[in-house]
Image (cartoon, helix red, strand yellow):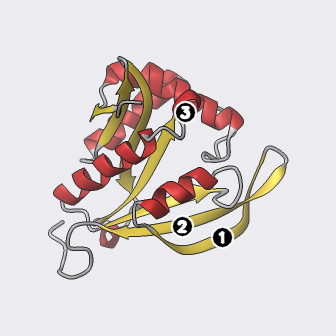
Amino acid sequence: MTAPAIRPATAADISAIAAIYGHAVRHGTASWELEAPDETEMLKRFDAICAGGYPYFVAERDGRVVGYAYAGAYRPRPAYRSTVENSIYIAPDAQGAGVGRALLDALMQDCARRGFRQMIAVIGDGTGASIGSRRLHERAGFRLIGVAEKVGFKHGRWLDQMLMQKDLGEGDRTPPSL
């Protein structure tokens, strides 16, 4: 299978993004939302990420959006300004085909170029249904930094939350420029 084309997302992609995310909300444990947001809400979120100076990408295969990824603020306090949290969602029929890795690689490169120094992956149910996300991040060089046990409840069961981290660019070897 050919590698997906990765490009910056646009407002025109929101319908596909909302469909991918909606499926994840309704059927998975990667997102801990219980109700899928509509396209209007997804557009607001997209606009906020972009206005904040963070990257937002989509993956296309045969002209169809099959996944998306973005980085956003890890926490709102100023001392966290050089650290981002990533989010990656893949259409069910495109999972396991390299789309997630292509998106994550593009996201890490772009975040490093923008001067971000650390990337955090907050993985819901990283030992269960979201094991693919954990493996994706491990292969990309993320390390496990903690597990909060039984902090979410969805689909009739308690869920753990896993935190993974990766240095970007200079990491912690020099002071940040942001």
Above or below, comparing residue 160 to residue 89 in the picture: below
Amino acid carrying mark 2 in the image: Leu
Amino acid carrying mark 1 in the image: Ala
Residue 113 at x, y percent in the picture? 17, 56
Residue under the image location 19 percent in, 62 percent down:
115
Mark 2, residue position? 163
The answer for how far apart the CA atoms under marks 1 and 2 are is 8 Å
The answer for how far apart the CA atoms under marks 1 and 3 are is 24 Å
Q: Is residue 96 left or right of residue 161?
A: left
Residue 140 at x, y percent in the picture? 40, 60
Residue 89 at x, y percent in the picture? 50, 39
- Look at the numbered discs 1 and 2 and tell me whether their residues touch, using CB distance below 8 Å: yes
Residue under the image location 54 percent in, 67 percent down:
163
Amino acid carrying mark 3 in the image: Tyr
Q: Is residue 18 left or right of residue 157?
A: left
Residue under the image location 41 percent in, 47 percent down:
101
The numbered mark, 1 or 2, whose residue comes first in the sequence reads 1
Q: Residue 36 lies in what quarter of the image?
A: top right
Mark 1, residue position? 148
Identity of the residue furthest to the bottom in this view? 173
